[in-house]
Image (cartoon, rainbow, N blue to C red):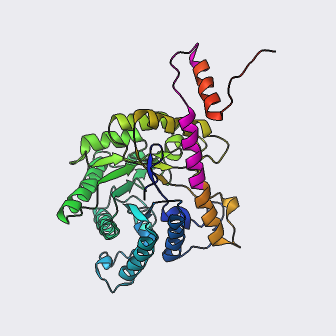
Amino acid sequence: MDFNQGCVSYRSMPFWCVGSPLSDPFGGAVLSRFDSLEIAKIIAWAGREGYIEATSYHDDDLVPWDPEHPEDDLDPSSPAGRKLREIKAVLDDAGVKVHASICSLHGNRLFRDGGLCNPDPAIRRLAAQKVERTLRIGQFFGAKYYVYWVARDGFEVPVVTKWEQVYEWLAEGLNHVTDYIRERNMTNYVGATVEPKPNEPRGQMFLPTSGHAAGFICGKLKEPDFWGVNPELLQHESMALMNACMTVAYLCSMNKLKFLHFGSQIKAQFDNDFPPLIGPEGLKETVMMFEALNRIGWKGAVEFDCHMLRAEGNPEDETGCRKQFIIDCVTALSMALKLAERIETPAAYASQSAADLAGIRQMCALGDIDPRR
């Protein structure tokens, strides 16, 4: 059953959000690393309780990757094959669909200088094999999308960066995605997306913003209609001081907003990945983003891409705090949608500031305000 409220057709809570152990560069994990089957059970609980309709994953979230055995998923008797079947049974029993299959090209140290854009052709071939495995896993789960997150495809030192080749390598890698989907008759995939990010884990990324991603898709890929963008809002775009309303409006105008990743962010900081609406800023921008989507008439999936605050991790109740995190995320989305529905575009206004204040009054249900003594 779909969520189907406002502009949101369904909600997806990925494995990496629920399973995050809450480590950071200054401290180790707060929580234990749960086995992927245990994470699947929490996600299934959320589906049965009516909090979500779908989930997503990186391939490494589900089963470990061994570069010496890149096709282990094809062997039903392998540990990977058995684990994938167990996870699917848990999700299917709860009616939780798989939204997207994402290849991790950032975790393994082999990809420390990039995946699809690695200057070493042997590493690029290995990355392509890992992408193929991720696509096959997505076919097994019936995933709707394949997602390319820019991961470590970026640079720190311009003088050694192969500027004349990196975007050709990237196009080759992403065109291979669609070629493999067609060759293997993977009819489950309705599209693929690029998730841009300005920096982190690299100093700079080759596709830093949604505008870069949309331009690359339209100018460099063989099947541009199959590809779109899934911006992470507020996080990734806000790191580059972009505005969420502008991002979604631009992508909708280009017919490139396939779905969006959702959380909260302090502008110009590192990737906070706060839960939606949480933190010292972002409420107005978030609500106005959904108001813009309502006005444009877009409808699609919203996938959470965040983690609980490190301070909220409870080592004494590791399952309970993860469940509360899911509840907080979906509550925030429902709040943002309801606040956005209150806002009416003014037919006439004394000034743009007056129109903005009127929208805030509507959002906050303040009614008329008399500023006089």
Image quarter (top left, top right, bottom left or bottom right) of the C terminus: top right
Of residues 318 and 213, the one drawn nearer to the viewer in this rendering? 318
Q: Magenta region's main secondary structure?
A: helix
**Is 62 within the magenta?**
no
Q: In this view, does 330 lie above or below 219?
A: below
Measuring from the top left, give residue 364's x and y in whole percent. Answer: 65, 34
The reply to whether residue 75 is visible in this rendering is: yes
Measuring from the top left, give residue 290's x and y in whole percent. Answer: 50, 39
Q: Is residue 292 above or below residue 58?
A: above
Of residues 43 and 163, the one drawn nearer to the viewer in this rendering? 43
In the image, what residue occupies the spot 43% across and 55% down? Answer: 2
Measuring from the top left, give residue 367's x and y in whole percent. Answer: 67, 27
Relative placement, left or right, of 126 versus 180 is right
Measuring from the top left, give residue 3's x and y in whole percent. Answer: 46, 53
**Is 343 within the magenta?**
yes
Residue segment shown in magenta:
329-353
